[in-house]
Image (cartoon, rainbow, N blue to C red):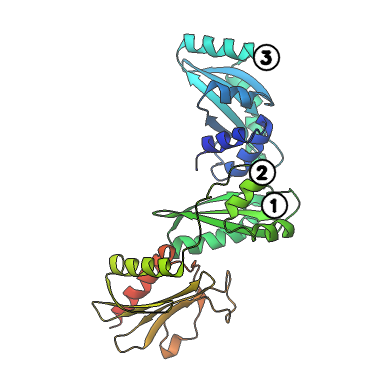
Amino acid sequence: MRLNDVITDCIRLKLSGAATDNVIQCFGGNILRKEKPVLVIEVSSKEILLWMMQGATNVHVYISAGTFHVNAMYAPTVRFPAARIYFMKSKNLFWFGHIGVYLEQNGIKLTPVDDASFSKLIDETGYIQRYKPWYEKRKADSRLFDGLLGGRLKNTAVDQAIWLSFDGKCLVCGEKADRMATSTVWGKSGMMIGMHLCLTHEEESQKQSILLNYLSNHLGGIVMFSNMRPLTTEEMLEQTCEILKVNFKCTIMKVVGETVTARRQSGITVVIRHQSPSNYAYIIMTPEGKQLSRVDSADHHIVPYGPDHVHSDLRKSTKNVVETSFTYGHICLDMKLLLKLIQEAEDKL
């Protein structure tokens, strides 16, 4: 998800330049670094640049190494320690003249700044002092999300994430919030998106099948995933069988109700039961039918980020050892952990 795409969506929603910058601050914390006191975003058109200049703290032209940088700068804030600069650039003097005329015709007059003035505008000297408390606050706010992400990176198809930070407040209404909501978008891999919501908006969001659609609707935007629907039982079974055959190199033994039983060449049996993402089980068994490991969603163990959990080794000495599985209850996303359990089972044969 590129910041330029976020800006385009905000403008489509008719959010002002300042409001768009507020949204960018929510996303920008994911890429902000201690070594860089400014978040720079090169925009794709003079129209977008003009939009961002209306409401900017400062508009100017900064010349560096023979390149004209036409900048809309937003000053550091209490909840975001770095300045944000939305800009276009070129070495072409005629391009700069054209942009300058266009902006003046729309009421914007550029001020030239040198290195010293630029450093002062972004308050470079005070950045580290602002960054440290911001980083600690962000780390505390996202601790729950980071813990979930760590497990998802280890056990599922998730390989990236975005934490939409609003200074520990509800992303919808701005009230203090300590509840986390997440949504995962996936194709070949998954991206997990997390945010804080207050109790009211958490309950509202749960009425929508897709969290991102809820947020988009609430902001008056376009529903992003209007063509998505839950898979039917038949479609889920068909998908499960295909994954077991192609990705797990299994032979399908039987399909009974919502349960698929398959077998590897080694004799290891894999059982997938899926009634819903909150009611499922993955079972790995010996050729003789003895359970070696199991992942399931039954709410009978106290585990972080539960109730989904994994019994990695069901032999007598370790059968009561239970860990959070971090799984989704969707085999497409959960393959990494399943393949690991299968490999461990085959190593025990």
In terms of sequence position, does the residue under pointer 3 or pointer 1 come before the other? 3
Crowd class of label 3 (few under 14; some 14 to 19; many from 20; radius 10 Å) = few
First in residue order: circle 1 vs circle 2 = 1
The vertical placement of 218 against 295, above or below, is: above
Closest to the camera, between mark 2 and mark 3, is 2
Do the CB atoms of the residues marked 2 and 3 lie less than 8 Å apart?
A: no
- At 56% from the left edge and 34% from the top edge, which residue is drawn? 8
For disc 1, the marked residue is 168
| Res. 349 in view | yes
Tell me the CA gap for discs 1 and 2. 19 Å
Q: Which mark is residue 219?
A: 2
Residue 157 falls left or right of residue 343: right
Which residue appears at 55% of the width and 25% of the height? Answer: 87
Q: Position of residue 220 (x, y in %)?
A: 66, 42
The kind of secondary structure element at disc 2 is loop
Residue extending farthest to the left is 265
Q: Is residue 335 above or below residue 218?
A: below
Q: Check the image and report above or below for 116 versus 83.
A: above
Horizontally, residue 266 falls left or right of residue 90, namely left
* Image quarter in which the C terminus is found: bottom left
**Residue 321: x %, y % from top left:** 49, 82
Give the amino acid at mark 2. Leu
Q: Amino acid at mark 3?
A: Gly
